[in-house]
Image: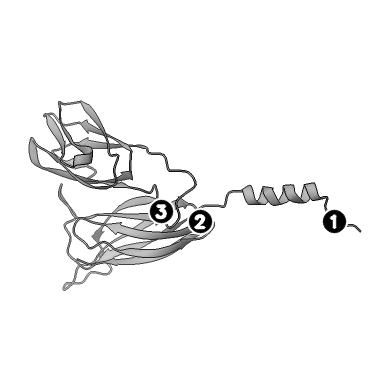
Amino acid sequence: MNLMLPVGLLLAAVFAVSDRSLPAGGVEGTVRTEVKVTTKGATSQRDVVLYLEPKQKPAEAPKPGKARVVQKKLSFEPHVLPLLRGSEVEFANEDQVKHNVFVEAECCKLDVDADKGENKTHVFPQAGEFPIVCRLHPEMTMYVLALETPHFVRVELQKDKELSTDAKAVFSATFKIEDVPPGAYTLRTWNKKLKALEREIVVAEGGLQKVDLVLEK
């Protein structure tokens, strides 16, 4: 029996395999801290952003998207907004009073008022951490975290009843970042009170790498 394939068919098979996109993977796990954090109110410290930075530049640049922030009950919702650099943010005033959106950063300056029911849009073209306030109600604050990667998630720390004791409070959250192309990444964290953490991660085809992180002050 002749098992030899014609050269043309053999090359076609090779290229078909090499062109086939690899199944995406991801990272999942827990993040916790024994540092006391405020988990309620408009200025809470519960928000943790986790994101994956690729070791190699992707073949195609990720496309910026759109996000929405609501001004409601004299607060910004969400309090922390991660997004891909270049994305457009819509600020929607759903309160009965006039609000303001103020960004001081040179790259993304904004100082605009919005009446009840008005929406204002703004683009964050540069990566970075951008504090935002309402100049009419200074107690209203939030953060936009503009990233170079589309692979991120925001989670909220809550008191862990199983791990906490009378002498020690533990705060934790679970996270999952999916649809990540296989490869080497640096996993980073952001929280406005807790120290940033990083871990070297290899995302496998079609699998979820498990990671448990402990944040400190």
Q: Nearer the viewer, residue 30 or 60?
A: 60
Vertical position of residue 136 compared to residue 35: above or below: above
Residue 58 shown left or right of residue 164 in the figure: right
Image location of residue 169, percent across then percent down? 19, 68
Residue 154 shown left or right of residue 178 in the figure: left
Question: Tag 3: residue type?
Answer: Ile
- Report the disc number at residue 177: 3
**Picture quarter containing residue 136?**
top left
Vertical position of residue 61 compared to residue 54: above or below: above
Q: Nearer the viewer, residue 146 or 56?
A: 56
Question: Tag 1: residue type?
Answer: Met
Residue 16 shown left or right of residue 58 in the figure: right
- The residue that appears at 15% across and 49% down in the rendered structure is 43
Question: Tag 2: residue type?
Answer: Pro
- The quarter of the rendered structure image containing the C terminus is bottom left
Spatial CA distance of label 2 from label 3 is: 13 Å
- Report the disc number at residue 182: 2
Spatial CA distance of label 1 from label 2 is: 33 Å
- The residue that appears at 49% across and 58% down in the rendered structure is 183
Q: Are marks 3 and 1 in contact (CB under 8 Å)?
A: no
- Report the disc number at residue 88: none
- The residue that appears at 36% across and 51% down in the rendered structure is 152
Image location of residue 56, percent across then percent down? 45, 55
Q: For mark 1, what is the residue?
A: 4
- Secondary structure beneath dot 3 equals strand
- The quarter of the rendered structure image containing the N terminus is bottom right
Q: Residues within 10 Å of mark 2 (few under 14, many from 20)?
A: some
**Picture quarter containing residue 201?**
bottom left
Spatial CA distance of label 3 from label 1 is: 44 Å
Residue 212 shown left or right of residue 203 in the figure: left
